[in-house]
Amino acid sequence: MQRLGLVGGLGPESTIDYYRRIVDLAQKKKLPESPSIVIDSLDVKRGLYLSGNDRAGLIEYVMGSVKRLTAAGVDFIAIAANTPHLVFDELAERSKVPIVSIVETCADEAERRGLKKVLLLGTRFTMEAPFYPQVFRKRGVEVIAPEETDRHWVHDRYVNQLLNSVFRDEVRAEFAGLIERARRESGIDGVILGGTELTILLVDSEIPGLQLLDTTALHVAAIVERIA
């Protein structure tokens, strides 16, 4: 059994969701013992500020967590958030233990499902960054982001509601409307829930004719497979 190091806190609700899903999936897979998990929790407000203003600072901030987890004896690490993957390559290069990428995991699943064009939702930093499009392009999948006005709306709801554990039915309906409009206007066949709080808000939603890529569920499956 491998010991997992989880970079958490970005935000707290998704970290709780990760922990619960990892334990539940391990039980379903009938692993011989409960997963050994070490969590190092960062501050979401600081993480968001660094994401938008100080990329080098973000690397050092998350790298501090990676080092603490490594010192605690973990065998591999996962970051329980999408936005810090802005600096994933730099972190993976400096880490002494493997880091499981949420983006690579999601891209593998998109390719497996035969998706061709997907909408990316998440923080503004995630939607406007190249890391999802670049990884998906290698697998023949096009990634698009919402128009600028919609990006601002998504980011606002994400940062001011979802990260504060506010999940409202009317916001769920508004997200569904945005997704449906993208399907109609851009011909998408899937949606990347590229924010781990989005998977809490939308995972049970039904968007006719579209496949939702639940990044948390996919990441958790990859984590549990490695634990075993």
Image (cartoon, rainbow, N blue to C red):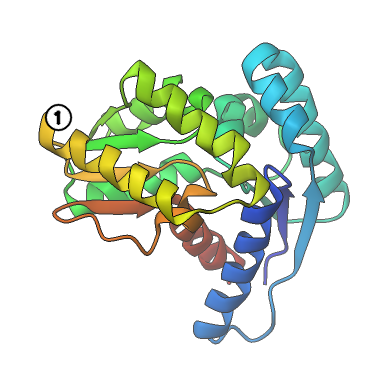
State the image quarter where residue 130 is shown.
top left
Residue 159 position (above or below residue 99): above
The image shows a total of numbered marks equal to 1
The amino acid type of the residue labelled 1 equals Ser
Q: Nearer the viewer, residue 155 or 59?
A: 155
Residue drawn 32% across and 26% down? 146
**Which image quarter is the N terminus in?**
bottom right
Where residue 160 appears, as percent x and y from the top left, is 61, 36
Residue drawn 68% across and 42% down? 10
Crowding at label 1, few (<14), some or many (≥20) Cα neighbours within 10 Å?
Answer: some
Where residue 87 appears, as percent x and y from the top left, is 60, 25
Left of 36 or right of it: where is 196? left
Q: Which residue is mark 1?
A: 186
**Residue 98, can we see it?**
no
State the image quarter where residue 218 is shown.
bottom left
Left of 43 or right of it: where is 194? left
Residue drawn 30% across and 47% down? 176
User: Residue farthest to the front?
Assistant: 170
**Residue 226, can we see it?**
yes
Left of 148 or right of it: where is 72? right
Residue 219 position (above or below residue 175): below
Where residue 79 appears, as percent x and y from the top left, is 63, 45
Q: Nearer the viewer, residue 116 or 29?
A: 116
State the image quarter where residue 132 is shown.
top left
**Which image quarter is the C terminus in?**
bottom right
Residue drawn 52% across and 23% down? 125
Task: Give the secondary structure at mark 1.
Answer: helix
